């Protein structure tokens, strides 16, 4: 049988060497001190083991407590979710009933004539007025509609028919000015 890789023969050899080095008179004192040191080491090992055991039990109890709080919170959250869902369903039904009642009591609305915008104020003559083709500006306090951009019409240039088909200038011929895209006008 071996202990930490040390067999009986090695232990016997160490005892013989100790007897030779220490001597027979001091051998009981040294054995007592070695036994005392082993007991101290065992005591420290037990203290460390007990401390780790206590810490492990404390952490385990804290984990169980937190798990219980989380379960309680999730149950409370589920209850709140159910009550909110019931309230929203109830409000949805009330809104549907109210809108059906309003639709039943109001007369049918006639569609507006083309090109006229509805006025936010009753009997107001401040409707959006067109300022130029494709652009309107709101005068009733609402947000203005975006303006559309219109390109200027290009000026007609006197260009011969050969220039239209031959776009690449030759070395003999100077570069012709071609009509570029007209600039945008706001």
Image: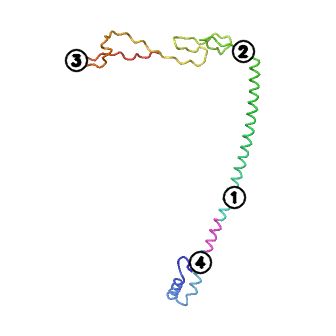
Residues at marks 4 and 3 touching, judged by CB atoms closer than 8 Å: no
| Alpha carbon distance from label 1 to label 3 | 98 Å
Dot 2 or dot 1: first in sequence order is: 1
- Residue at mark 2: 108
Which residues are the magenta region? 42-52
> Mark 2 or mark 4, which is nearer to you?
2
Magenta residue check for 65: no
Dot 2 or dot 3: first in sequence order is: 2
Dot 4 or dot 3: first in sequence order is: 4
Which residue is located at x 69 percent, y 56 percent? 64
Query: Secondary structure beneath disc 4?
Result: helix
In front of the other: 118 or 106: 106
Question: Residue extending furthest bottom?
Answer: 24
Which quarter of the figure is the N terminus placed in?
Answer: bottom right
- Residue 166 image position (x, y, % from top left): 30, 17
- Residue at mark 4: 38
> Mark 1 or mark 4, which is nearer to you?
1
- Residue 143 image position (x, y, % from top left): 58, 19
Magenta residue check for 44: yes
- Residue at mark 3: 172
Query: Secondary structure beneath disc 3?
Result: loop
Dot 4, crowdedness within 10 Å: few (<14), some or many (≥20)? few
Query: Secondary structure beneath disc 1?
Result: helix
């Amino acid at each position: 049988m071996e202990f930490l890789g040390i067999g009986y023969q090695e232990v016997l050899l160490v005892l013989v060497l100790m007897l030779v080095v220490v001597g027979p008179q001091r051998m009981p004192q040294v054995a007592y001190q070695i036994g005392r040191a082993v007991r101290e080491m065992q005591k420290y090992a037990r203290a460390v083991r007990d401390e780790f055991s206590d810490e492990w039990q404390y952490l385990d109890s804290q984990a169980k407590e937190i798990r219980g709080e989380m379960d309680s919170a999730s149950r409370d959250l589920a209850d709140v979710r159910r009550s909110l869902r019931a309230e929203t369903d109830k409000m949805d039904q009330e809104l549907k009933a109210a809108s059906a009642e309003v639709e039943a009591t109001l007369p049918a609305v006639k569609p507006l004539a083309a090109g006229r915008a509805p006025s936010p104020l009753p009997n107001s003559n401040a409707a959006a007025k067109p300022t130029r083709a494709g652009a309107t500006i709101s005068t009733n306090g609402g947000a203005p509609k975006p303006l559309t951009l219109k390109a200027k019409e290009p000026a007609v240039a006197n260009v011969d028919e050969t220039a239209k088909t031959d776009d690449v200038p030759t070395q003999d011929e100077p570069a012709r000015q071609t009509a570029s895209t007209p600039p945008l006008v706001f």
